[in-house]
């Protein structure tokens, strides 16, 4: 850091802290729930300034900030560090941390121990895990029983994308849609406080909504979900490429970042930076004393 850290800013500092009952009341009043991913202090501050309801430290951070080719490789310690940094910038939104692949599948004990680490060590309010099969449902129930709120995630589940045939929409056949429905109902039964529907046909979401009493947050799941989530880097254009069909870009920050760093590099190379105003002065008498001492 080159200067003192700025105090947290944004319109959100006075708003009440988000709770799970309040999320439910948003669903009941049909107030759209806004969720966004964040992975560090500045992205959390941006989410707070926009007064979003839920901040998700997604394991998408494996790709967006850690440079892995998929979400599979990211480890618990890495996700804990991202979550703790995001916690420091999150004052009012509900903070949910993704349990990384391999950190909950082995046993209920492993899942509970991992979830507790995210709450105690990183300050998460809740955790999210992927899948609606019996393993995920059992792990969700065990974590809830241990006192940690759980968000489920059905449809396209990137941690097991290979088994799903790649990063593609799910629920496009009756059998696949029924499997999503079964998973969603089972996770609701397991006392998850909320669900993510990812890459699910709009009509499938619409058909399921009347049967789901907990908030459903969609990503590529249409307008009938109770809320929407997008990946921070996707919505701000902080990476190359088109992204999934459901991504809407609200800024082109990768271009802005590239241009800014290129302008800085050019200024250093041609001597434009630093200019006089970027330097510090010293009293001429002190400078004379200093150079005299140096010469002795
Ligand atoms: O990891 C992530 O960012 C997610 C969202 C896409 C829901 O799971």
Image (cartoon, helix red, strand yellow):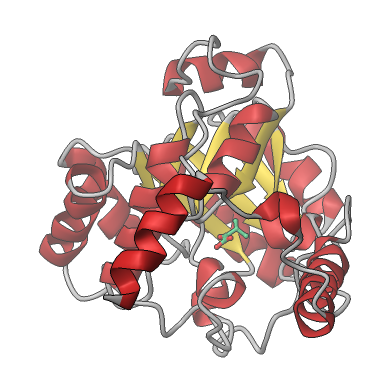
Quadrant of the snapshot with the C terminus:
bottom left
Tell me what residue is drawn at x 53 percent, y 67 percent.
61
| 252 vs 120: above or below | below
Q: In which quarter of the image is ligand 1?
A: bottom right
**Between residues 109 and 114, which one lies in front from this camera angle?**
114
For residue 106, side relative to residue 282 (left or right): left
Q: Where is residue 179 in the image (x, y as percent from the top left)?
A: 59, 65
Tell me what residue is drawn at x 70 percent, y 81 percent.
167
**Between residues 94 and 26, which one lies in front from this camera angle?**
94
**Between residues 33 and 14, which one lies in front from this camera angle?**
14
Q: Is residue 241 visible?
A: yes
Q: Where is residue 197 in the image (x, y as percent from the top left)?
A: 64, 53
For residue 257, side relative to residue 188 (left or right): right
For residue 222, side relative to residue 93 (left or right): right
Tell me what residue is drawn at x 29 percent, y 66 percent.
293
Q: Position of residue 124 (x, y in %)?
A: 33, 42
**Between residues 97 and 10, which one lies in front from this camera angle?**
10
| 175 vs 69: above or below | above
For residue 90, side relative to residue 290 (left or right): right
Tell me what residue is drawn at x 74 percent, y 56 percent.
276
| 46 vs 165: above or below | above
| 68 vs 84: above or below | below
């Amino acid at each position: 850091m080159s200067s003192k850290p700025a105090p947290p800013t944004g319109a959100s500092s006075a708003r009440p802290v988000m709770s799970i009952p309040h999320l439910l009341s948003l669903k009941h009043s049909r107030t759209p729930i806004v969720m966004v991913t964040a992975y560090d202090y500045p992205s959390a501050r941006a989410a707070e300034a926009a007064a979003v309801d839920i901040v998700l430290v997604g394991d998408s951070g494996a790709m967006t900030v850690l440079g892995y080719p998929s979400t599979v490789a990211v480890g618990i310690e890495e996700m804990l560090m991202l979550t703790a940094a995001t916690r420091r910038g999150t004052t009012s939104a509900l903070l949910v941390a993704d349990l990384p692949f391999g950190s909950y599948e082995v046993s209920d004990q492993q899942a509970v121990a991992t979830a507790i680490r995210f709450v105690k060590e990183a300050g998460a309010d809740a955790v999210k895990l992927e899948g609606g099969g019996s393993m995920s449902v059992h792990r969700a129930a065990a974590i809830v029983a241990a006192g940690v709120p759980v968000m489920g995630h059905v449809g396209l589940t990137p941690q097991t994308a290979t088994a799903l045939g790649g990063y593609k929409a799910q629920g496009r056949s009756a059998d696949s849609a029924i499997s999503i429905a079964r998973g969603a109902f089972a996770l609701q039964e397991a006392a998850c406080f909320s669900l993510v529907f990812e890459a699910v046909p709009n009509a499938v979401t619409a058909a399921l909504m009347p049967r789901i009493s907990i908030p459903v947050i969609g990503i590529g799941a249409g307008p009938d979900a109770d809320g929407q989530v997008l990946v921070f880097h996707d919505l701000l254009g902080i990476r190359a490429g088109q992204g999934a069909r459901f991504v809407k870009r609200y800024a082109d920050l990768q271009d802005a970042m590239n241009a800014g760093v290129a302008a800085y590099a050019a200024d250093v190379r041609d001597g434009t930076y630093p200019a006089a105003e970027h330097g510090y002065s010293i009293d001429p008498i002190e400078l004379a004393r200093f150079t005299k001492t140096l010469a002795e």
